[in-house]
Image: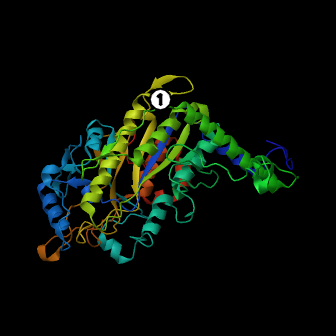
Amino acid sequence: MSAAGSVSAPFAMNLFSINVAAAATLNADYKALVCVFLGGGNDHNNTVIATDAASWSGYQAARNIGGGASIALPQASLLPIVPTTPIVDSVGTRSFALHPAMAPMKTLFDAGRAAIVANVGPLLMPIPDKVAYRSGTVQRPANLFSHSDQTAQWNSTDPLKRSYGWGGRIADQIKSSNTAQNFTSLSLSGNTAFLAGETINQYQINANGTPVAISGFNNLFGSAGNFTQSVVSAATSGNLFEIEHAAVVQRAIAAQADLSTVMSQTSAAVVPPPSQYTNPNTNVLASNRLADQLQTVARIIAGRNVLGAHRQVFFVTLGGFDTHDRQAPGHADLMARLSHAIEYFDTSLSSLIDVSAGTQSDMRSNVTLFTASDFGRTFTSNGDGTDHGWGAHHFVVGGAVRGRAIYHQGGFPMTAVTNTAAGIDNPLDVGSGNLIPQISVDEYAATLAKWFGLAPAEIAAVFPNLANFSTPDLGFLI
C-alpha cells in the first residue's frame, strides 16, 4: 500500500485496502451465481402444480373464481414430476407437475440437476399463519403487493441498506478472489439494485456481450481525434478527487478492452448460439432473448481465466410476468422461453472450453442458476389473469444442486382458497389465495452464499435478518 498522502494510487482504494487485507475471502477455484429475474411477478400456481386429489380439487375451484374463463391448466397436459423424497404433510401424500410448456425443466428436474424451493418471499421474521399476520404482533414487509417495493425487498433483504442488493453485497465479501475485480458482478439487463454493492460496482454489458463503453469524445468541438484520454481519464493536477476519477475511468477503459478480447475469443465454436424456441401458442420458431443473455454469460465463464475471475455473480432478466389479463397464452410462452433458455445454458456448460488453455470441461457443478421475481400471484383468477401476490415457488439449477427435490418449510402449501361457507380454511391465505411465505429470501439467498464460499460471519453481515430464522442453510446445494 502507498504511504499516506501519496498520489501514486487512488486514495479511496488505499483506504479500502485496509479492510481487504483484514478480511479478504480468497478462493482459487471457480464458482458463479446466475440470477434469472422474472420481471412482473411469476404465477407460481401454474408453474408448479400440486395434483393430488385434494389439491387438484382446490386448484380447479380457485382458478375458476373471477367470472371469466378458467385459467386452470388441463390436468392431462401437465408434466408430472416425482421428487426423490415424497412430501407427506397435513394435506396427505402430495403429487406434483410442471406447466406443459416446461418440458426442458422437467428433463433437468428428473436428471437431478434442478430443484424447486416452495413458497419463498420477503420476510423480516417468520409469520406462521394468517392469525399472526393479522394480529399485528409480528413485523411484516412494508407495502406488500407493490411491484417496486417488493422487488426492492427481494433485491436487498436488509431494510437498513435498501440501496444495496444481496448479490452486490455477496460480491463485496468475495471480490478479493478475483484478479480483476471489475468482473465480479455483471449485469446483462442494465443497472440493477440486486448487484449494487457497498464497495463493488456492477459491470454492465449488453445481451450480446458488448460493454457499455465511454463514448462521445471523437471530434470534440469540431477537432479531429479522440479526446477520451485527455478529457476524461487523465489527471492534470494533484487534486485527489481528480486522480480518483481518472483512475476509475482508466480501469473502465481497460476492462472494456479485456472483455472485448474475451468476446472475440469465444466464437460460436466455443459457445454455440441457442436454437430458436417454439412458441406453444403458435408452434412458430422464434428467438429467445433470455437464451441470448445466458449465451453471453457462458462466453464470459469460458474466458474466466483470461479475466482472472474465480467468483462471479450474473444478473439476467425475462420480463412480461405481470399477467393481469390473457394469462393463459402469455404465461405459456414465458414458461417455454424460461425452460428453453435454462436447458440451453445447462448444455452449454456441460462441455465448455476454457479459452485460455483450449481445454474442455463440464462446468455445471461450478455454476448455480436460480430464479427470483417481484412476488407470486393470486391463486384466484380476476377473470382472465391474476393479481399481485406474495410467496412463490422458485427453481435452482446446476450440477451442485441436490436435485429432483422440492424444498419446503412445514409442508407444501395447501392448494385451496379459504372459503368459510364450504368449510375450507387455508392458514397461509391472506386473501385471494395470496400465500404467506414460509421460506424467507434471506434463507434462500444465504444457502446460495454458503455454496459460493462465504464464511458464516460474512453471511451474517450480508443477511442480518437471517438471525430471525431457523434455517440458514436450506440444504439444496452440495
- Residue at 30 percent across and 39 percent down: it is 108
Q: Is residue 394 above or below residue 308?
A: below
Q: Is residue 437 left or right of residue 51?
A: right
Q: Is residue 210 above or below residue 138?
A: above
Q: How far across and how far down the image is residue 304, in percent?
A: 55, 34
Q: Is residue 400 left or right of residue 10?
A: left
Q: Which residue is mark 1?
A: 270
Find numbered disc 1 in the image and state the secondary structure of the residue it sits on.
loop
Q: Is residue 421 above or below residue 357?
A: below
- Residue at 24 percent across and 68 percent down: it is 384
Can residue 404 be seen in this snapshot? Answer: no
Q: Is residue 274 left or right of residue 314?
A: left
Could you tell me which quadrant the C terminus lies in?
top left
132 vs 82, nearest the viewer: 82
Can residue 182 be seen in this snapshot? Answer: yes
53 vs 294, nearest the viewer: 294
- How many numbered markers are drawn? 1
Residue 1 picture quarter: top right
- Residue at 18 percent across and 57 percent down: it is 73
Residue 278 picture quarter: top left
